[in-house]
Image (cartoon, grey):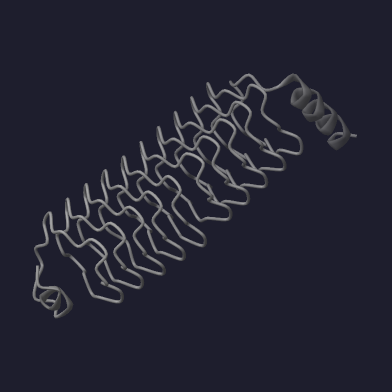
Amino acid sequence: MNINDIRSGNLKQLLGADLEDEDLSGLNLQGVNMAGARLIGANLSRAKLTGASLDGANLVGCQMTAADVRASLVGANLMQADLTEADLRGSNLRGANLMRASLNKATFAGAFLSGANLMGVNLQGVDLRGADLRGANLSGANLQGANLSQADLQGALLNEANLEEADLQGANLAGANLAGANLLCADLEQTNLDGANFTGACLVGTVLDRATKHAELPIAHKELESESFRHSTL
């Protein structure tokens, strides 16, 4: 593989290419087919990947700081990848592995993350508005202050996740597992909680205005909610 051809923009077909540890920083790779490519440890910082195909690509440890990754990454392995400040709006990350990835200040608004592995990932303050997270594994993830408004989390695993002060307004949590989750002061206004599991979850200060409540909420929270309602009607 001639790296100079890639830098010149002459190559649009990199299907299955071996680009391990290559410096591709700042390159315009828009629309390039990199499906199944080996990009372990590669540097894609500030690269433009809009419309590119990275389906099934191996991006373990890849540097993608501030990159435009509005691309297709179905089943891609992004374990330990650095996506700090990366733009992933509307990206297709179905079934992708993002374990131990760095996602500080990344934006996933409208992204497709159904079935993705985000177990234990730090998503503090990350923008996930309207994201499709159906069946995603977010067990133990740090979602403190994250924006999950209008996100679809149906059947997602959120057990032991930290959702303190997270914005879940209008989100779909039907059938989601939130056992042991921390929802301290989280906003679940107009959220669908049908069939969600809140066993052992902390719901102190949680906003549940107009949320569907077909879920079994912890007794302690039911008492707090009743007391709050009583005072609001005095």
218 and 81: which is toward the camera:
81
What is the residue that sits farthest to the front in this orientation?
21
Percent across and percent down for residue 173 are 51, 32
On screen, residue 89 above or below 97: below
Residue occupying image coordinates x 29% and y 54%:
59
> Is residue 14 rendered to the left or right of residue 72?
left
Percent across and percent down for residue 215 are 59, 21
On screen, residue 140 above or below 222: below
Percent across and percent down for residue 219 are 75, 19
170 and 25: which is toward the camera:
25
Please give the count of numbered marks on the rendered protein: 0
89 and 119: which is toward the camera:
119
Residue occupying image coordinates x 66% and y 36%:
182
> Is residue 64 rendered to the left or right of residue 227?
left
> Is residue 184 rendered to the left or right of residue 119?
right
Residue occupying image coordinates x 46% and y 60%:
106
Percent across and percent down for residue 48 are 28, 71
What is the residue that sits farthest to the right in this orientation?
234
- The image quadrant where one finds the N terminus is bottom left
- Picture quadrant of residue 14: bottom left
- The image quadrant where one finds the C terminus is top right
